[in-house]
Amino acid sequence: MITMKDVAKLAGVSPITVSRVISSPEQVRPATQAKVMKAIEELNFKPNNIARSLVTNRTDTIGLLLSNIANPYYPEFILGLETYARAQGKNVIICNAQDYDTASHNLELLLEKRVDGIVITSIEFASMKLQEKFHAELEDLVHMKQKSIPIVLMDPNPRSTLLSCVEVDNYLAGRIAMDHLHSLGHRRIAHLSVERDANVWIDRMRAFKDAYRRYGLDLQQELVELIETEDVRAAAAAATRLLQCTPRPTAIFAGNDLLAIGALHAAHRLGIRVPEQLSIIGIDGINVGDQIYPRLTTVAHPQSKVGEVAAQLLLDKINGNDDNSSIILKPALLVRESTAAVEKL
């Protein structure tokens, strides 16, 4: 097995110089760099990542904790994050974090792997108390005196945090969705969402209620259905209840695209034509929304961009930029086939 000592002997330099060429080439004269690189090439030497990390105190690896690895929102996000990270010479370890125990276990795993930093997506544990506890633990990690670790949050829960964040304006997304339906003449709009202490759902619900106030309309409680999890079947059952109201809503604003797909299923089973008799809009812009019939109108998040920005912010921190800034990205309306002007009766 070829070692740094072999490279050093062939290049006529010390092993420390070889290490510096590998980890910090700017500290070595160009002529010496050239001799070392020639020796590395001749011997086909591949630096051991573990040995290199002991010298640089870095592993060139970042961690990603996902709140639900099965959520179809995340593939584009992961692609954006990993593409940017790999372009900067970083590898990514992906772990799940759907509950407090799993998140804590996988966080410890990433720390044992000596990752250089961690991106953590929106955490939605069983209670806000657990979410606050986990965030306090994260803040302790970032502010440790001995060896702190950079952390960036995506759509943090709770929002009041000392950590750097990347988020999409979910209140604006909800407002865009409601304004689109209102512009099409809909006045009896229902809302289908998830009953959870998470800013994503809270902001979208707030946008729904505020829209009714802005329009001067009376919001009836029967027009709101909340379910426990992001499940298409549960969403379909809840949407069925909404569509059995009298008079029936002419539109449904779903808290995300998965719930909107459940609403589409419910309308189909009840023989209600979309969009001729019912308009449905979601939020997120997941790919499956473009593959169903009718194609789903949505307020799309720039998912790949969110991942890229999260990676960029984290790598800036790893490289010594201690700015705790947060970045808010804007969603955009994507009109497809599931919304139309309200039918004139």
Image: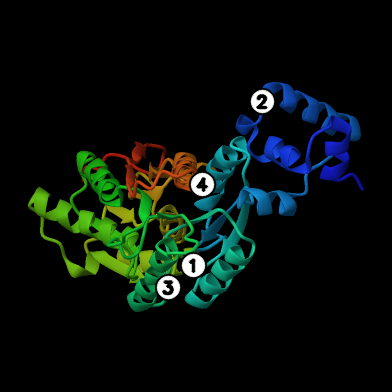
- Residue placed at 84% from the left, 32% from the top? 12
- Residue placed at 68% from the left, 39% from the top? 20
Mark 3 or 1, nearer chain start = 3
Q: Identify the secondary structure beneath mark 1.
A: helix
Marks 2 and 1, how far apart at CA: 65 Å
Q: Position of residue 316 (x, y in %)?
A: 45, 42
Foreground mark, 2 or 3, reads 2
Classify mark 4: residues with Cα within 10 Å, few (<14), some (14-19) or many (20+). Answer: many
Q: Mark 3 points at which residue?
A: 125
Judge by depth and name the residue closer to the eye, 287 or 155. 155
Name the kind of residue labelled 1 in the image.
Arg
Judge by depth and name the residue closer to the eye, 122 or 274. 122
Name the kind of residue labelled 3 in the image.
Phe
Q: Name the residue under label 4.
A: 77
Query: What label does residue 334 carry, if any?
Result: none
Q: Can you say whether 32 is above or below 318 in the image?
A: above
Query: What label does residue 29 carry, if any?
Result: 2
Q: What's the colour scheme?
A: rainbow
Classify mark 1: residues with Cα within 10 Å, few (<14), some (14-19) or many (20+). Answer: some
Judge by depth and name the residue closer to the eye, 319 or 63. 319
Classify mark 3: residues with Cα within 10 Å, few (<14), some (14-19) or many (20+). Answer: many
Marks 4 and 3, how far apart at CA: 21 Å
Q: Where is residue 288 in the image (x, y as percent from the top left)?
A: 53, 47
> Disc 3 vs disc 1: Cβ atoms closer than 8 Å?
no
